[in-house]
């Protein structure tokens, strides 16, 4: 935990922790840095060879020396070849190592997000969690592949160029540095401004896009309420805002680019003028001045690129930090070490004084004691907010109680291995998530080895053959994104079949509340009957007809279990919550 706090405050701690979690990045790092140094030093060969060729070859005291010139050029070519090879090898190693490490980091983060309980997933927005695995890691990857080594080669290049420049002329070197120190700050300042301007552009682009898409998607509503003028004024405003931000960014970019150019030519001019004097009074040769001009390029280039890369590095470190924060959050529902498997067959459930409060909230379950025998079909009913869903989540260990315990069979739920729990206990939520794929793909999700014939059998056992056959392509019908091509009731049918083929010993089901057409309603209730046979079933019942056909009913009220027994008995208890619920249901059914 202390490491996490460090990582929050200090970029080096983030890098250290990041390297700890992705040890692949350190593999062969020494050799890669060596290659980077070779690349940086190799670039000096051009200025140095130019100086040698000019001073000792073409303008040698004893007259031009062709053999010397050829030898220097040939040696220079060999060194350049080695430099290019080292550069290629360095980039290749960087790409391979960073992609492997980051793919593993993505996998680990993704798994960890799954291990974090429902609670955490709700408190962090889902989109933000997805961003951890995608864009945040991309930022790190971009930096490692493009920026990281640029920083190493740039620093090496600046140092090496300075040393060689000083050998040729310390006076010119001091002049270059005097100009460059303030210029570096100026460039960094300009780039900071530029980055801020582009952040504004990104914000105004997304505002504009959302205004455009809202007015397109909601065109019907806009027309129905006759608010076209207001909508288009809003659109105009966002387009105008975007134009303004874009212009500001372009202006800053032009200033920044112009300043860079100006400095570059300015430094060159200073070097040429001062250099001419030094050559004239004999303290510098023509070759040395020529080499110096080359070296100034090698010196200025990394300063400009380096400051850009520093901005990238800041983004990468904060991206990395966000990923590490996720990885360093301990799952509050953990797979027990040496956990037990659930015994075979339908399983009983016992709640012993179970209490629960959502993080930072008031207690919502106040000591629930209940015993559900194996093989029973139990309906859970109660007003909205009475605690039914919370009860179901505790039953399937999507979260752990804040007091008391839940026991499955004879094993406390916290001692049951995740693998056993997830294969033997299934929860069907109200809006069972359907994946973008065919009907068969969605059913097979629970059991990939199922053949089409077996899936057909499952549909027929649940009395749904006619429904599948009426679909345009039977089992191969595409359900669309989140099942958009079928109705809400039909989505729950698919979720039921998916739960049925996974053959759990305890099935927890949250009945759909949305209105369902009568034909689907009939299918759902007969499928539900078939699904519940031969296993313990707990149904959060929103229709009292489900409670009527259950073996027993649990009635929740304001976080307490207030009644428990068969429907026929509970309905007799005068002035009870259940009798009240039942009466209002009967009235509602009659009036509709
Ligand atoms: N994620 C959450 N964070 C904080 N409080 C929550 C959360 N989920 C539910 N609650 C609160 O817990 C209480 C019980 O909610 P729960 O969802 O268990 O009720 P419910 O009986 O299932 O209601 P419904 O029939 O509307 O689904 C409510 O007061 C609710 O506001």
Image (cartoon, grey):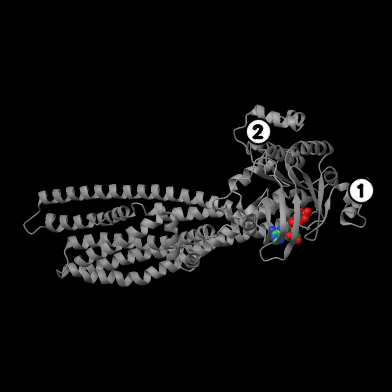
Q: Toward which corner of the image does residue 577 lie, by quadrant? A: bottom right
Q: Residue at x 62, y 29 (%)?
A: 451
Q: Which mark is residue 440?
A: 2
Question: Is residue 427 toward the left or the right of residue 243 in the image?
Answer: right
Q: Nearer the viewer, residue 590 or 274?
A: 590
Depicted 13 relative to depicted 101: above or below: below
- Give the spatial CA distance, label 1 vs label 2: 39 Å
Ligand 1 appears in which quadrant? bottom right
- Image quadrant containing the C terminus: top right
- Horizontal and vertical percent position of residue 233: 70, 58
x then y, percent, for residue 229: 75, 56
Q: Secondary structure at mark 1?
A: helix
Q: Is residue 274 above or below residue 495?
A: below
Decide: few, some or many residues near mark 2? Use Cα within 10 Å; few <14, some 14-19, many ≥20.
many
Q: Is mark 1 within 8 Å of ligand 1?
A: no
Of mark 1 and mark 2, the one earlier in the sequence is 2
Residue that mark 1 sits on: 586
Q: Position of residue 538 (x, y in %)?
A: 75, 47
Q: Is residue 175 above or below residue 106?
A: below
Q: Is residue 498 visible?
A: yes
Q: Nearer the viewer, mark 1 or mark 2?
A: 1
């Amino acid at each position: 935990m202390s490491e996490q706090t460090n990582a929050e405050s200090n970029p080096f701690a983030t890098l250290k922790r990041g390297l700890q979690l992705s040890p692949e990045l350190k593999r062969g790092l020494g050799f890669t840095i060596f290659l980077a140094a070779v690349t940086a030093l190799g670039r000096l060969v051009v200025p140095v060879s130019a100086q040698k060729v000019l001073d000792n070859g073409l303008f040698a005291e004893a007259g031009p020396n062709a053999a010397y010139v050829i030898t220097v050029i040939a040696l220079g070519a060999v060194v350049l070849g080695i430099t290019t090879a080292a550069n290629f090898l360095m980039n290749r190693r960087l790409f391979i190592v960073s992609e492997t490490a980051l793919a593993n980091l993505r996998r680990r983060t993704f798994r960890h997000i799954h291990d974090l309980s429902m609670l955490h997933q709700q408190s962090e927005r889902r989109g933000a969690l997805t961003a951890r695995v995608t864009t945040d890691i991309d930022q790190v990857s971009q930096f490692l592949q493009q920026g990281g080594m640029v920083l190493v080669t740039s620093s090496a290049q600046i140092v090496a160029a300075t040393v060689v420049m000083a050998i040729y002329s310390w006076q010119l070197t001091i002049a270059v540095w005097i100009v460059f120190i303030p210029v570096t700050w100026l460039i960094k300042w300009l780039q900071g401004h530029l980055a801020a301007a582009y952040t504004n552009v990104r914000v105004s682009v997304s505002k504009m896009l959302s205004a455009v898409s809202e007015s397109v998607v909601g065109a019907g509503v806009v027309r129905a309420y006759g608010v076209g003028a207001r909508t288009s004024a809003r659109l105009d405003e966002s387009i105008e805002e975007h134009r303004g931000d874009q212009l500001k960014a372009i202006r800053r970019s032009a200033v920044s680019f112009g300043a860079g150019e100006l400095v570059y030519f300015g430094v060159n001019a200073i070097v040429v003028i001062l250099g001419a004097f030094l050559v004239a009074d004999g303290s510098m040769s023509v070759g040395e001045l020529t080499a110096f001009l080359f070296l100034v390029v090698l010196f200025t280039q990394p300063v400009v690129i380096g400051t850009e890369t520093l901005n990238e590095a800041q983004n990468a470190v904060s991206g990395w930090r966000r990923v590490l924060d996720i990885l360093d959050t301990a799952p509050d529902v953990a797979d027990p070490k040496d956990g037990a498997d659930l015994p075979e067959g339908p399983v009983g459930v016992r709640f012993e004084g179970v209490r629960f409060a959502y993080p930072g909230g008031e207690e919502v379950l106040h000591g629930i004691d209940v015993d559900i025998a194996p093989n029973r079909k139990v309906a859970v009913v109660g007003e909205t907010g009475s605690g039914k869903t919370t009860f179901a989540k505790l039953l399937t260990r999507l979260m752990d109680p804040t007091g008391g315990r839940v026991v499955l069979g004879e094993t406390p739920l916290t001692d049951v291995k995740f693998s056993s729990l997830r294969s033997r206990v299934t929860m069907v939520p109200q809006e069972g998530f359907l994946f973008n794929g065919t009907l068969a793909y969605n059913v097979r999700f629970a059991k990939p080895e199922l053949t089409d014939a077996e899936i057909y059998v499952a549909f027929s056992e649940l009395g749904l053959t006619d429904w599948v056959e009426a679909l345009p392509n039977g089992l191969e019908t595409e359900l669309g994104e989140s099942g958009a091509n079928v109705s809400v009731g039909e989505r729950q049918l698919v979720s039921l079949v998916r739960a049925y083929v996974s053959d759990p010993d305890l099935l927890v089901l949250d009945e759909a509340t949305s209105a369902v057409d009568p034909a689907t309603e009939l299918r759902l209730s007969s499928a539900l009957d078939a699904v519940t046979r031969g296993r313990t079933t707990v149904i959060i019942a929103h229709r009292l007809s489900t409670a009527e056909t259950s073996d027993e009913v649990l009635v929740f009220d304001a976080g307490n279990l207030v009644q428990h027994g068969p429907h026929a008995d509970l309905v007799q208890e005068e002035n009870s919550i259940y009798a009240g619920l039942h009466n209002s249901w009967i009235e509602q059914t009659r009036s509709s």
